[in-house]
Image (cartoon, rainbow, N blue to C red):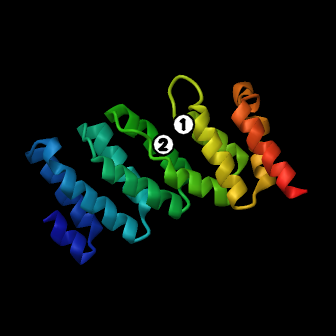
Amino acid sequence: LVEGYCLAGDLEKASDSFRKMVEKVEASSTGYALELLVSTYCRKNRAADSYKFVTEMIDGKDLQPWHSTYKILIGMLLAQGGFKEALDVLPLMKKQGYPPFLEPFIEYLSKCGSPDDAIAFSKAMTVKRYPSTSVFLQLFEAYFKVGRHNEAQDFLAKSPRYIRNHADVLNMFCSVKSGEK
């Protein structure tokens, strides 16, 4: 039923059918239907509604989406302007033991994210403290690749001291500066 309603474009009936399915069958056997529903919401430019539905199912029904479902959701949230919601998906992934999905965040941040967005992303990636230096290096490199040197500099200024003083980070900024002259 969920698949049929998704194909027909009736997301309300598809969502209701999914809720009924979760009540009747074991939550672990609903992965395909949930991914189909998420994909359909996202294709209809309703990624934010998809996010709300997924969080409702995780919180209320203890549902565990597939890793690929999270990837679809994050990618479409970022594409449809839902940066904060996409950040909120990261802890859900971590809770299930999935690795964070970095690529769409790095692409988004390099093209249109602010240094404050980059800091929020780096904080959302980890529970204890900031993520590894490699994540910061990837972000700096992405900023430089698209020519957003000022944003990279502002992000560096807001980064933790161990990042600002890291040899690889300093070398990257020095090589970019010497390349600009």
Determine the CA span between mark 1 and mark 2: 8 Å
Residue type, mark 2 in image: Asp
Residue 116 point in image, percent of width and height: 70, 43
Rendering quarter of residue 57: top left
- Number of other residues with Cα within 10 Å of mark 1, as a class: few under 14, some 14 to 19, many 20 or more: some
- Above or below: residue 37 compared with residue 123: below
Mark nearer the N terminus (1 vs 2): 2
Give the left or right position of residue 126, taking residue 142 as reference. left
Rendering quarter of residue 28: top left
Residue 101 point in image, percent of width and height: 45, 46
- Residue that protrudes farthest toward the top in the picture: 128
Callout 1–callout 2 Cβ contact below 8 Å: yes
Q: Quadrant of the C terminus?
A: bottom right
Q: Quadrant of the N terminus?
A: bottom left
Look at discs 1 and 2 and give the one toward the viewer.
1
- Residue that protrudes farthest toward the bottom in the picture: 8
Q: Which is nearer the eye, 16 or 167?
A: 167
Residue type, mark 1 in image: Ala
Residue identifier under label 2: 88
The residue under the point 78% across, 44% down is 173
- Number of other residues with Cα within 10 Å of mark 2, as a class: few under 14, some 14 to 19, many 20 or more: some
Circle 1 SS class: helix
Residue 124's mark? 1
The residue under the point 63% across, 39% down is 136
- Residue that protrudes farthest toward the right in the picture: 181
Residue 12 point in image, percent of width and height: 27, 65
Q: Which is nearer the eye, 83 or 19?
A: 83
Give the left or right position of residue 88, taking residue 180 as reference. left
